[in-house]
Amino acid sequence: MTNEVTDNLTKEKIQQLLAAVGHEPHQDAEKNTEAPEHNWSQPHYFSGDQLKIIQYFAERVAAATSCKFGELYHSDFDVTTTSTSLHFASELLNPPADNKQCDFYLAFGTSQSPEPETQTDIPENIRPCGAIAIPHETAIIWTTELLGDAKSEEDSTRDLSQLEESLLSDIASLLVEAFSDSCDKQDFHRLNNVVVNQFPLEMEKSEELCKIDLDIKKADSENTSKPYFLIRCNKLEPIIGITAQADDEISTEDISKAITRHLQQMNLSVTAQLGTAYLTFEELVGLGTDDILLLDKKVNEPVELLVEGLELLYGRPAKSAGKYAIAITKTKSDNAR
């Protein structure tokens, strides 16, 4: 630093500097504090235990699918659930621009109308809530095996004929039936026919979807098809024991809880403020490499944490997962309220 800056050092600041240079690291600062990590950028509509219940439901869907495909193709099928995961709609509604393969979707939903007289009748006033997603290669496998054709290398890039798309709608309907048969809380029905490369539900980007991936393999075939379900998370609430309420029965407390749950998904900036120093402009431009800038705190004093610029928490320096961290020691309850 320049001489002018050095002359401005007070006796107290010089003592602080000497103490910092010769002082052993504070004992608390050396502790390796491990804290559970929580990624708020990921959906958390269901807890881990609730996802396990949905996984059991997905396994029932897989078993029902195996039976229905076996009846259609007159062959044994091995159907397994490969994953059950949560996603924001924004992740799934915008396919990559370089994706040259067309996916097919069959929408399904619930209805309060009477049961259809036949399997081909689609009830009126169905409220769409999900879709069966069928990758292009899976669509080729299903239709060629049903028609008794041999799958060639050219099939992976060709378009489906009108007949094949009609057959694909019927095959995908079996998945909707398997999904509905596995759920004793509500009935699901298909909507119209398959559509190409266009997700058939209108959703906000922040809405949460549950994705259930299946692997379907015919006993005498080497081809494995990989369809998956996409369904609004709130439609799975009855499966895990959450009872839906009518709009006029929703209490103020329920509304408050719903708002709080959505607020918890918001990203906030948190700043750890080690201390503050005040310099003149002349002192600032005089700073150079290896200069030491004294802060207005001792090394063992608490660090302030600013949440969106508001001082709410206090902590001490720590380490976690190989990175610098702050271990929370107390809160500033007045500001928090």
Image: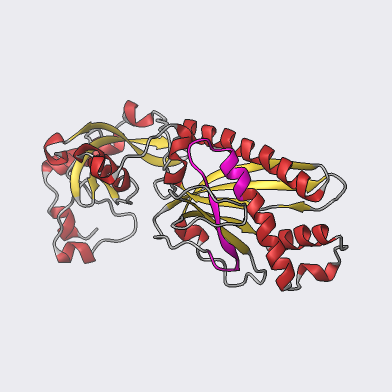
Quarter containing the N terminus: bottom left
Q: Nearer the viewer, residue 262 or 115?
A: 115
Question: Residue 70: x percent and y percent?
Answer: 77, 44
Image position of 21 (left or right of 309): right
Q: Residue furthest front?
A: 117
Q: Is residue 196 magenta?
A: yes
Image position of 47 (left or right of 57): left
Q: Is residue 141 magenta?
A: no
User: Is residue 304 among what the camera can see?
Assistant: no
Q: Which scheme is used to colour this image of the protein?
A: secondary structure
User: Is residue 170 among what the camera can see?
Assistant: yes
Question: Residue 158: x percent and y percent?
Answer: 76, 73
- The relative height of residue 248 versus residue 137 in the rendered view (above or below) is above
Q: Residue furthest top?
A: 27
Q: Please tell me which residue is depicted at 76% across the width and 57% down the height of the picture.
A: 142
Image position of 170 (left or right of 45): right
Question: Residue 99: x percent and y percent?
Answer: 63, 69
**Number of callouts:** 0
- In which quadrant of the rendered view does residue 47 lie? top left
Question: Residue 146: x percent and y percent?
Answer: 80, 58
Q: Please tell me which residue is depicted at 43% across the width and 63% down the height of the picture.
A: 202
Quarter containing the C terminus: top left
What range of the chain is rendered magenta? 176-199
- In which quadrant of the rendered view does residue 131 lie? bottom right
Q: Please tell me which residue is depicted at 62% across the width and 72% down the height of the picture.
A: 98
Q: Nearer the viewer, residue 221 or 284?
A: 221
Q: Please tell me which residue is depicted at 62% across the width and 40% down the height of the picture.
A: 61
Q: Nearer the viewer, residue 288 or 329?
A: 329
Image position of 256 (left or right of 194): left
